[in-house]
Image: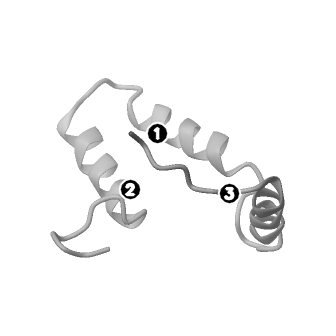
Amino acid sequence: MAQQLGLTLTDLKAGVSWWLSKDKWPHDFHNTVYYELYDLRRNGLSDDWWGKTVDRLWDWRAIRKQGQA
């Protein structure tokens, strides 16, 4: 069974407030990222698309060396 994170609405509001306090970060982060990913895919699933997608995931730390948290 999945473990609940125990986050509250207060936690969410604090996180959003922190995000919006960053001057150089987009205010609508997720939509901006999705449009970038859709744009990468506009010519289909290609080697170029794959390379850029892997780079993006690495930058997000979604890909990590084994044993790295």
Q: Position of residue 2 (x, y in %)?
A: 42, 43
Residue at horizontal 81 percent and vertical 53 percent from the top: 9
Comes first in the chain, label 3 or label 1: 3
How far, Cα to Cα, is label 3 from label 1? 28 Å
Going from N to C along the chain, the mark reached first, 2 or 1, is 1
In the picture provided, is 1 more to the left or to the right than 17?
Answer: left
Tag 2's secondary structure?
Answer: helix
Q: Earlier in the sequence, mark 3 or mark 2?
A: 3
Q: Please tell me whether residue 69 is drawn above or below residue 7 in the rendered image.
A: below
Judge whether 30 appears above or below 41 on screen: below
Quarter of the figure that contains the C terminus: bottom left
Give the x, y percent position of residue 1: 38, 39
- On the image, numbered disc 1 is attached to which residue? 37
Residue 7's disc number: 3
Residue 18 as seen in the image, left or right of residue 31: right
> Which of the two residues, 52 or 10, is positioned nearer the viewer here?
10
In-front residue for pair 14/61: 14
Q: Would you name the residue on which mark 2 appears?
A: 56
- Name the residue at 18% across, 39% down: 47
3 or 1: mark nearer the eye: 3
Q: Amino acid at mark 1?
A: Leu
Badges 2 and 1: C-beta atoms under 8 Å apart? Answer: yes
Q: Secondary structure at mark 1?
A: helix
Report, in whole angstroms, how far the alpha carbon at label 3 lies from the one at label 2: 27 Å
| Pick the front one: 54 or 7 | 7
Find numbered disc 3 in the image and state the secondary structure of the residue it sits on. loop
